[in-house]
Image (tube, rainbow, N blue to C red):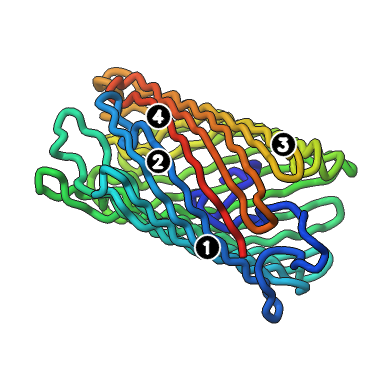
Amino acid sequence: MKLLVVAASLALGLFIPLSTSLARDDTPDDRPAAPGFASGAFRFTPSVAATEEYNSNIYTEDDRDTGDFITRIIPRIHIESEGQPYRLEANAKVEQLFFADETQNDYLNASAGAKYHAKLDPSLAVDVSGAYARLHALPGDDEADPGANASEPISYSAGRYKTGLTKELGGFTFMPQLGLKTMNYESVARINGTRLDEGFRDRREYMAGGRVGYKIDGAYEIFTDFSYTPIAYSRGSPTDRDSKGGDYLAGLRYKPSKDLSAEFAAGYMNRDYRRQIYDDIGALDIAAKVSWFYADKSAVTASFNRSIGEVTDAGVGGAIYDSFKAGISKQLDDDWSVKAEGGYTRSDYQGGHGATDGKSRRENNFYQASLKLNYALNRYADLIAQYMYNNYDSNREISDYAQNVIMFGVKAEF
């Protein structure tokens, strides 16, 4: 767990936004103050998005790129409490994808989640959250044996659940947390008619940890972040990937105003595997984040994070990920806004059969960039346009790929 990195969602970035307003307040005073409608203690905000995109490389292949047009229809409902001593947010959505040419890839995703926050007394608060999603991943690219590729998208479910307390005592802030993440994959048929067994990827990831902070003055806070994260795979075998480990950091937070904040922490992270066929991992842990809201609805953000992640290559337990992200958003006028983002992630696979030619560790470099324009038709509907570029460079050459995505669409809240 990295408490320095603020999650934008509960489950794989799919849902539970903190704000649902898509448009500006440019309507007469007798119009509703916000989209949606109130009923009792809650406000309900239904919305729908429809987008059309062209993806130049839907299977992320290193050659013989397959491009396709993809239509997405995404209805959603957002619910939040109003005027209560607690705060409750809930979301549910479905996402239907239609492929123009590769129609065997059409699929439907569904997700739902909720957050609950309550102030028990002036110095004590409780937070509970949970999210569940049924998702799909497109078939992979096996050049050595194309018939071994999956014949349809791979279905899987993802769940994430967390609870925690925040207690202020003197100048200290205590934030203990418990969490659980689940991943379950469905097996599918290969193109050649055999079965592609995905059950070896099913797992449960537990978390216990939190943060202890101490405010030096109004702008500075020192803290420690810590977590213990055992991982249990559902399928036991001589090659199972069960492991235990965690993150242990100490850092400084600087927040001179509500518009500017910065955090930096350093420490140690590790992952020890039950089976000796995997390399245990221990490494320096670093995390940093800066956020500057320099104008109304405009911000600059940058972050760096190190982590140990699970991988699916046979014989490899995990990899060290170094990830840098930066972005800038600007409200150009009452109707137009723009957002530019970029990122770089380096992954270092820790030995095992997944190493290149079995002789040296596999290393990957992933570059991302995107530019998004938003135009408010009115306070309820926006037009959107986005360009994204992805480039994956690996010392395992057959894994290299480049991808361009151009998307246009409309979003509306009611």
Could you say which disc has been placed on residue 310 in the image? Answer: 2
Along the line of sight, which residue is nearer the eye, 216 or 331?
A: 331
Who's the residue at 40% across and 37% down the image? Answer: 54
Q: CA distance from mark 3 to mark 1?
A: 26 Å
Query: Which sits earlier in the primary sequence, circle 4 or circle 1?
Result: 1
Tag nearer the camera, 2 or 4 = 4
Asked whether the residues under the numbered discs 3 and 4 touch, taking CB atoms below 8 Å apart as contact, a structural biologist would say: no
Q: Secondary structure at mark 2?
A: strand
Q: CA distance from mark 3 to mark 4?
A: 26 Å
Who's the residue at 69% across and 53% down the image? Answer: 23
Q: CA distance from mark 2 to mark 1?
A: 31 Å
Residue beneath label 3, please?
A: 330
Please state if 288 lies on the left or on the right of 355 as rendered. Answer: right
Residue beneath label 4, please?
A: 403
Q: Secondary structure at mark 3?
A: strand
Residue beneath label 1, please?
A: 76
Q: Amino acid at mark 3?
A: Lys
Along the line of sight, which residue is nearer the eye, 334 or 9?
A: 334
Query: Which sits earlier in the primary sequence, circle 3 or circle 1?
Result: 1
